[in-house]
Image: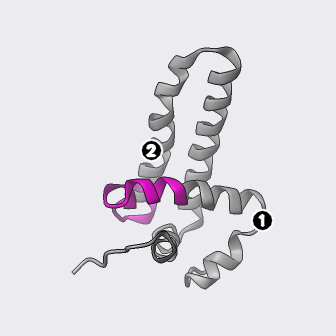
Amino acid sequence: MVERYSTFAEFWPFYLREHSKPRTRALHYFGTTLVVLLAIAAILTGRLLLFAALPVAGYFFAWVAHFGVEKNRPATFTYPLWSLGADFKMWWLWLTRRLGPELRKAGVKG
């Protein structure tokens, strides 16, 4: 039976375990960074069509990571909003060099 999570706090360690490989996380970081840059470019240039590229940019790299590297099913399919929030949380913790302790708490090595 698949475990169901009722809070983001319960979901977060699961999310990190689903991103246990450094290459998986790196592809997520790349995709999330691209999403942020595209959003900024859309706002600054007024080219609002760039917003249409956000899901493609974000999900392409994430799904390559899950299906090609991690060999698991993206949590987005079951927890779409929590996964989106967790993507940005993981990205921000990585950028601010605070992800390591979170990974260790979730039982992820390196």
Give whichever of discs 2 and 1 has the lower sequence position.
2
> In this rendering, is residue 97 above or below 10?
above
| In the foreground, 60 or 12 | 12
According to the picture, the residue beneath numbered tag 2 turns out to be 59
The quarter of the image holding the N terminus is bottom left
Magenta segment: 67-86
Q: Residue at 61% x, 31% y: name it.
A: 39
Q: Is residue 15 magenta?
A: no
Furthest residue toward left: 1
**In this rendering, position of residue 70 left or right of residue 47:** left
Q: Residue at 53% x, 60% y: name it.
A: 86
* Tally of numbered discs: 2
Give the amino acid at mark 2.
Answer: Tyr
Label 1: state its secondary structure. Answer: loop
Q: Is residue 1 visible?
A: yes
| In the foreground, 102 or 11 | 11
Furthest residue toward right: 96
> In this rendering, is residue 41 above or below 62?
above
Q: Which mark is residue 97?
A: 1
Give coordinates of residue 57: x percent, y percent. Answer: 51, 37
